[in-house]
Amino acid sequence: MRPLSIIRDKAKAKRRHVVLPEGTEPRVIRAVGTIIQEELASVTLLGDVDEVKRLAAQEGVDLTDVNVVNPANSPDFSGYVEQFMEIRRDKGITEEAARETIQNPLFFGAMMVRNDKADASVAGSVNTTGDVLRAGIQVIGLKPGIKTVSGAFMMTVPEYRGVQDKVFLYADGAVTPNPDAEQLASIAVSTAETMENLIGEEPKVALLSFSTKGSAKHEDVDKVLAALEILKRDYPELKVDGELQVDAAIVPEIGKRKAPGSEIAGESNVLIFPDLDAGNIAYKLTERLARATATGPIVQGLARPANDLSRGCSVDDIVDVCAIAILMKG
Ligand SMILES: CC(C)(COP(=O)(O)OP(=O)(O)OC[C@H]1O[C@@H](n2cnc3c(N)ncnc32)[C@H](O)[C@@H]1OP(=O)(O)O)[C@@H](O)C(=O)NCCC(=O)NCCS
């Protein structure tokens, strides 16, 4: 079975609730039709109720079992406004600004997740990645100990060294242009957790570089080594090594030769890139040259899941990201 089908099945078994803030987007409505039909999750759609219902009728989607909520008319609205003012108190937010923010379905959806009214939020079919991330960062916040939100790409390679549909996670491919050592360590921890939650494989984390084990000296290598030190200190059970060139990370013979004695060299399934240039270029190259399927960015590092879609997403992509978001809760 393909990794994304396995993810859908695992998500279904969790019997969770997703909120989709973009309730007036026809692709989202069709995706909800599939989610309900496949009993993948229960759903809240946000938006003007009449408009959502009109569109659903037009798309032939039965919303009988779907909770449709207009944020501004919700009985939770004023409570969320108060909470948001509390969260943003040190930013000097006015009540008027808070009311306006919580009327935005992205923020209302994030509030539902924060308050356990939904397990995960999924948006981005019409909103930008930045807007989706900002709602998640401001309302849900970061996981304890994590310094940055990041975006992982799940790369499903058709065949790698005899394994069909081999999955690697690449990060960060979407958020932080020049992570410092602490941020890099956080990206590694989050991506390792994503590997466990989504794929159920033991994460073997490689901190990538243009150098392997001191073959080159440069301040960029020092940053990777500083991240490794943080990880060894704060996450002693994590299987991680660096600095490694990517061949030493994923080719067993080269790993043995260039990084003898390493716990993960040659066997890595979680690839942490030193910066966003490297991560973003690598995922697109793998997609094009190795005909891999790239799924993501999978937003990670938030205390609870709020996931992003690409604006060009298909109905099927939305269903997949809902399944991913459900599993990101652990
Ligand atoms: C993350 C992002 C939304 C922050 O945007 P921003 O509002 O311009 O950033 P600011 O520097 O003004 O910070 C706003 C808040 O977010 C926080 N923040 C910014 N980047 C963060 C990150 N990576 N992780 C956690 N918090 C972050 C800031 O600390 C700040 O918090 P505060 O409001 O409590 O003070 C922005 O970097 C972004 O849009 N990234 C996505 C890039 C993208 O589109 N990639 C392509 C996808 S393939």
Image (tube, rainbow, N blue to C red):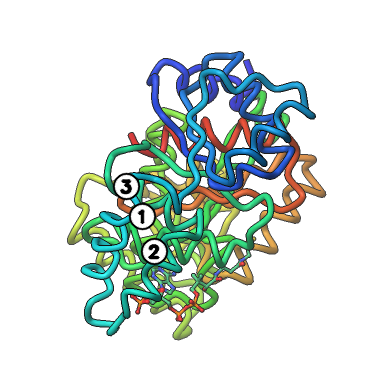
Q: Image point 57% across, 38% down: which residue?
A: 321
| Residue where numbered disc 1 is placed | 302
Tell me the quadrant of the picture where the N terminus can be found. top right
Q: How many residues crowd mark 2 within 10 Å: few (<14), some (14–19), many (20+)?
A: some
Q: Kindly indicate whether the residue at mark 1 contacts the one at mark 3 (C-beta within 8 angstroms).
A: no
- Mark 2 vs mark 1: in front: 2
Q: Is residue 261 visible?
A: no
How far is mark 2 from mark 1, CA to CA?
Answer: 7 Å
Q: Image point 55% across, 65% down: which residue?
A: 131
Cβ of mark 2 under 8 Å from ligand 1: the answer is: yes
Amino acid type, mark 3: Asp
Q: How many residues crowd mark 1 within 10 Å: few (<14), some (14–19), many (20+)?
A: many
| Residue where numbered disc 2 is placed | 137
Asked if residue 279 lies left or right of residue 265, the reply is right
Amino acid type, mark 2: Ile
Residue 317 % position (x, y):
68, 36
Asked if residue 168 lies left or right of residue 85, the reply is right
Tell me the quadrant of the picture where the C terminus can be found. top left
| Residue where numbered disc 3 is placed | 76
Q: Image point 57% across, 49% down: which residue?
A: 123
Tell me if residue 265 comes above or below residue 85 in the rendering: above
Say which element carries label 1.
loop
Q: Quadrant of residue 127?
A: bottom right
Q: Nearer the viewer, residue 146 or 195?
A: 146
Total numbered labels: 3
Q: Kindly indicate whether the residue at mark 1 contacts the one at mark 2 (C-beta within 8 angstroms).
A: yes
Residue 24 % position (x, y):
66, 44
